[in-house]
Image (cartoon, rainbow, N blue to C red):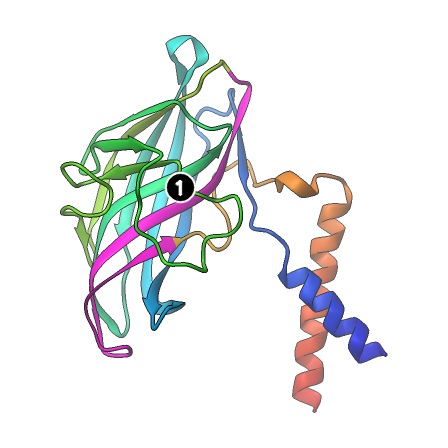
Amino acid sequence: MKKLFLGTALVLCLALPAQAVTVNVADVGASGTTVLQGYVDVNGNAVSIPGLTGTLFLEYDGVTNGGLTWNFDYTVTNTTSGNVTASRISSFGLSTTPNITGATSTGLFDLSLVNPSFPNVQGPVVSGSALEVCFSSGSNSCSGGDGLLKGQSASGEFTLTFATALSAISLDHAFLRFQSIDGSAYAFNGASGVGFDTGGVVITPQAVPGPMLGAGLPGLLAACGGLIALARRRRRAA
Protein backbone atom coordinates (compact mmCIF):
# COMPACT_ATOMS: atom_id res chain seq x y z
CA MET A 1 0.00 0.00 0.00
CA LYS A 2 2.85 2.42 0.81
CA LYS A 3 4.43 1.71 -2.57
CA LEU A 4 1.10 2.29 -4.31
CA PHE A 5 0.61 5.60 -2.51
CA LEU A 6 4.15 6.74 -3.29
CA GLY A 7 3.77 5.82 -6.96
CA THR A 8 0.44 7.63 -7.27
CA ALA A 9 1.79 10.74 -5.55
CA LEU A 10 4.82 10.81 -7.83
CA VAL A 11 2.61 10.62 -10.92
CA LEU A 12 0.59 13.58 -9.67
CA CYS A 13 3.75 15.56 -8.93
CA LEU A 14 5.29 14.86 -12.32
CA ALA A 15 2.00 15.83 -14.00
CA LEU A 16 2.05 19.37 -12.58
CA PRO A 17 1.57 21.81 -15.48
CA ALA A 18 4.36 24.03 -16.73
CA GLN A 19 4.17 27.46 -15.19
CA ALA A 20 3.01 30.52 -17.08
CA VAL A 21 4.69 33.75 -16.03
CA THR A 22 2.58 36.82 -15.21
CA VAL A 23 4.05 40.22 -16.13
CA ASN A 24 2.40 43.21 -14.47
CA VAL A 25 2.27 46.56 -16.23
CA ALA A 26 4.57 48.15 -13.61
CA ASP A 27 7.24 45.41 -13.79
CA VAL A 28 9.50 47.40 -16.12
CA GLY A 29 12.95 45.79 -16.23
CA ALA A 30 11.74 42.30 -15.34
CA SER A 31 13.85 39.78 -17.25
CA GLY A 32 14.89 36.16 -17.44
CA THR A 33 16.29 33.43 -19.66
CA THR A 34 14.23 30.44 -20.77
CA VAL A 35 15.91 27.18 -21.82
CA LEU A 36 14.13 25.39 -24.68
CA GLN A 37 14.58 21.70 -25.40
CA GLY A 38 14.56 20.50 -28.99
CA TYR A 39 12.26 17.75 -30.29
CA VAL A 40 12.35 15.96 -33.63
CA ASP A 41 9.81 13.63 -35.21
CA VAL A 42 11.39 10.16 -35.31
CA ASN A 43 9.22 7.50 -36.96
CA GLY A 44 6.07 9.41 -36.03
CA ASN A 45 7.09 10.09 -32.43
CA ALA A 46 8.27 13.35 -30.87
CA VAL A 47 11.73 12.58 -29.46
CA SER A 48 13.63 14.88 -27.12
CA ILE A 49 17.13 15.18 -28.61
CA PRO A 50 19.95 15.62 -26.07
CA GLY A 51 22.11 18.57 -27.07
CA LEU A 52 19.47 20.22 -29.28
CA THR A 53 18.80 23.32 -27.19
CA GLY A 54 18.41 27.07 -27.37
CA THR A 55 17.74 29.94 -24.99
CA LEU A 56 15.42 32.95 -25.10
CA PHE A 57 16.24 36.00 -22.97
CA LEU A 58 13.37 38.47 -22.47
CA GLU A 59 13.25 41.88 -20.79
CA TYR A 60 10.01 43.80 -20.35
CA ASP A 61 10.33 47.49 -21.30
CA GLY A 62 6.87 48.85 -20.47
CA VAL A 63 3.72 49.73 -22.41
CA THR A 64 2.96 52.29 -25.12
CA ASN A 65 0.09 53.06 -27.48
CA GLY A 66 -2.31 54.00 -24.69
CA GLY A 67 -1.52 50.83 -22.77
CA LEU A 68 -2.34 48.50 -25.67
CA THR A 69 1.23 47.61 -26.71
CA TRP A 70 3.70 45.74 -24.50
CA ASN A 71 7.40 46.10 -25.39
CA PHE A 72 10.18 43.55 -24.90
CA ASP A 73 13.87 43.12 -25.68
CA TYR A 74 14.97 39.65 -26.74
CA THR A 75 18.12 37.61 -27.27
CA VAL A 76 17.99 34.18 -28.89
CA THR A 77 21.02 31.88 -28.58
CA ASN A 78 21.64 28.55 -30.30
CA THR A 79 23.20 26.41 -27.53
CA THR A 80 23.25 23.16 -29.52
CA SER A 81 26.00 20.81 -28.31
CA GLY A 82 27.06 17.18 -27.89
CA ASN A 83 26.11 14.66 -30.56
CA VAL A 84 24.10 17.30 -32.43
CA THR A 85 26.83 18.66 -34.66
CA ALA A 86 24.79 21.36 -36.41
CA SER A 87 21.45 23.17 -36.19
CA ARG A 88 19.89 26.48 -37.17
CA ILE A 89 17.24 28.47 -35.27
CA SER A 90 15.12 30.22 -37.90
CA SER A 91 12.32 31.62 -35.70
CA PHE A 92 10.97 31.89 -32.17
CA GLY A 93 7.47 32.41 -30.84
CA LEU A 94 5.15 32.77 -27.87
CA SER A 95 1.68 31.97 -26.65
CA THR A 96 0.03 34.55 -24.39
CA THR A 97 -3.05 35.22 -22.30
CA PRO A 98 -5.07 37.07 -23.45
CA ASN A 99 -4.58 36.59 -27.19
CA ILE A 100 -2.76 39.33 -29.06
CA THR A 101 -4.10 41.36 -31.98
CA GLY A 102 -0.78 42.43 -33.49
CA ALA A 103 3.01 42.28 -33.19
CA THR A 104 6.20 43.84 -34.58
CA SER A 105 9.87 42.96 -34.26
CA THR A 106 13.39 44.14 -35.10
CA GLY A 107 16.78 42.48 -35.47
CA LEU A 108 17.46 39.20 -37.24
CA PHE A 109 13.94 37.95 -36.47
CA ASP A 110 12.19 40.95 -38.01
CA LEU A 111 9.18 39.16 -39.55
CA SER A 112 6.18 39.08 -37.17
CA LEU A 113 3.19 36.84 -37.85
CA VAL A 114 0.08 36.45 -35.67
CA ASN A 115 -1.55 32.99 -35.58
CA PRO A 116 1.12 31.62 -37.92
CA SER A 117 1.50 28.25 -39.54
CA PHE A 118 4.40 26.96 -37.48
CA PRO A 119 5.62 23.44 -38.41
CA ASN A 120 5.71 21.31 -35.31
CA VAL A 121 6.08 17.79 -34.02
CA GLN A 122 3.35 16.24 -31.93
CA GLY A 123 3.98 15.55 -28.28
CA PRO A 124 5.98 18.32 -26.59
CA VAL A 125 3.27 20.95 -26.98
CA VAL A 126 0.88 20.76 -24.04
CA SER A 127 -2.85 21.50 -24.15
CA GLY A 128 -3.56 25.20 -24.54
CA SER A 129 -0.05 26.12 -25.69
CA ALA A 130 -0.72 26.76 -29.37
CA LEU A 131 1.70 29.24 -30.91
CA GLU A 132 0.10 32.70 -31.26
CA VAL A 133 2.92 34.82 -32.64
CA CYS A 134 6.19 34.03 -34.32
CA PHE A 135 9.23 36.17 -35.09
CA SER A 136 11.18 34.84 -38.05
CA SER A 137 14.32 35.43 -40.05
CA GLY A 138 12.41 34.25 -43.13
CA SER A 139 10.94 36.44 -45.83
CA ASN A 140 7.31 35.30 -45.75
CA SER A 141 6.72 32.60 -43.13
CA CYS A 142 7.86 31.19 -39.80
CA SER A 143 8.81 27.82 -41.25
CA GLY A 144 12.11 28.74 -42.83
CA GLY A 145 14.68 31.40 -43.50
CA ASP A 146 18.21 32.08 -42.33
CA GLY A 147 18.84 32.10 -38.60
CA LEU A 148 21.35 31.27 -35.92
CA LEU A 149 23.89 28.52 -36.33
CA LYS A 150 25.39 26.58 -33.43
CA GLY A 151 26.86 29.01 -30.88
CA GLN A 152 25.39 32.17 -32.44
CA SER A 153 23.11 34.79 -30.80
CA ALA A 154 20.88 37.59 -32.05
CA SER A 155 19.11 40.43 -30.24
CA GLY A 156 16.32 42.85 -31.00
CA GLU A 157 12.97 44.16 -29.81
CA PHE A 158 9.40 43.00 -30.27
CA THR A 159 5.97 44.30 -29.35
CA LEU A 160 2.73 42.56 -28.45
CA THR A 161 -0.50 44.51 -28.97
CA PHE A 162 -3.77 43.61 -27.24
CA ALA A 163 -7.36 44.67 -27.87
CA THR A 164 -7.66 46.56 -24.57
CA ALA A 165 -5.32 48.15 -22.02
CA LEU A 166 -4.36 45.52 -19.43
CA SER A 167 -2.88 45.55 -15.93
CA ALA A 168 -1.07 42.23 -16.54
CA ILE A 169 -0.42 39.63 -19.23
CA SER A 170 0.66 36.00 -19.10
CA LEU A 171 3.51 34.58 -21.19
CA ASP A 172 2.34 30.99 -21.37
CA HIS A 173 4.92 29.21 -23.52
CA ALA A 174 7.93 29.86 -25.75
CA PHE A 175 8.95 28.07 -28.94
CA LEU A 176 11.92 27.77 -31.30
CA ARG A 177 12.06 26.47 -34.86
CA PHE A 178 15.12 24.25 -35.47
CA GLN A 179 16.29 23.42 -38.98
CA SER A 180 19.38 21.95 -40.67
CA ILE A 181 19.89 19.52 -37.77
CA ASP A 182 22.83 17.14 -38.18
CA GLY A 183 23.88 14.54 -35.65
CA SER A 184 25.22 11.06 -35.18
CA ALA A 185 22.87 9.70 -32.50
CA TYR A 186 19.84 9.55 -34.84
CA ALA A 187 21.73 9.89 -38.14
CA PHE A 188 20.20 13.33 -38.70
CA ASN A 189 21.11 15.06 -41.93
CA GLY A 190 19.26 18.35 -42.34
CA ALA A 191 16.33 17.44 -40.08
CA SER A 192 13.85 19.93 -38.61
CA GLY A 193 12.23 20.19 -35.20
CA VAL A 194 10.76 22.41 -32.52
CA GLY A 195 12.09 23.80 -29.26
CA PHE A 196 9.73 23.98 -26.31
CA ASP A 197 10.00 25.40 -22.77
CA THR A 198 9.36 22.24 -20.77
CA GLY A 199 9.69 24.22 -17.52
CA GLY A 200 7.70 27.32 -18.49
CA VAL A 201 8.77 30.82 -19.54
CA VAL A 202 11.32 32.38 -17.17
CA ILE A 203 11.10 36.08 -16.33
CA THR A 204 11.22 37.89 -12.99
CA PRO A 205 8.82 38.23 -11.13
CA GLN A 206 8.57 34.50 -10.60
CA ALA A 207 6.09 32.31 -12.49
CA VAL A 208 2.62 31.73 -11.08
CA PRO A 209 0.64 28.74 -12.41
CA GLY A 210 -2.70 29.91 -13.73
CA PRO A 211 -4.89 26.90 -12.78
CA MET A 212 -3.29 26.29 -9.38
CA LEU A 213 -3.26 29.64 -7.60
CA GLY A 214 -3.30 29.57 -3.83
CA ALA A 215 -1.20 29.43 -0.70
CA GLY A 216 -1.01 25.65 -0.85
CA LEU A 217 1.14 25.52 -4.00
CA PRO A 218 4.54 26.10 -2.31
CA GLY A 219 3.80 23.31 0.11
CA LEU A 220 2.72 21.03 -2.72
CA LEU A 221 5.92 21.68 -4.64
CA ALA A 222 8.01 21.05 -1.52
CA ALA A 223 6.14 17.81 -0.90
CA CYS A 224 6.77 16.71 -4.48
CA GLY A 225 10.48 17.34 -4.04
CA GLY A 226 10.47 15.23 -0.90
CA LEU A 227 8.58 12.37 -2.58
CA ILE A 228 10.95 12.30 -5.53
CA ALA A 229 13.96 12.22 -3.19
CA LEU A 230 12.35 9.41 -1.17
CA ALA A 231 11.75 7.38 -4.32
CA ARG A 232 15.38 7.76 -5.33
CA ARG A 233 16.60 6.59 -1.90
CA ARG A 234 14.36 3.53 -2.10
CA ARG A 235 15.70 2.65 -5.55
CA ARG A 236 19.28 2.88 -4.27
CA ALA A 237 18.42 0.73 -1.24
CA ALA A 238 16.84 -1.91 -3.48
Identify which residue is drawn at 39% across, 22% down. Answer: 101
Tell which of 57 and 47 is nearer to you: 47
Q: Is residue 171 inside the magenta stretch? A: yes
Tell which of 179 and 44 is nearer to you: 44
Where does the magenta region start and end?
166-195
Residue at numbered disc 1: 131
Identify which residue is drawn at 29% across, 41% down. Answer: 75
Q: Secondary structure at mark 1?
A: loop
Tell which of 94 and 233 is nearer to you: 94
Where's residue 84, x and y in %? Answer: 25, 70
Where's residue 93, x and y in %? Answer: 34, 41
Whether residue 225 is visible here, answered yes or no, is no
Answer with left or right where residue 124 lies relative to residue 2. Answer: left
Identify which residue is drawn at 34% across, 50% down. Answer: 55
Where's residue 207, x and y in %? Answer: 57, 41
69 relative to 80, above or below: above
Answer with left or right where residue 138 lies relative to residue 30. Answer: left
Whether residue 224 is visible here, answered yes or no, is yes
Answer with left or right where residue 42 lies relative to residue 23. Answer: left
Q: Residues within 10 Å of mark 1 (few under 14, many from 20)?
A: many
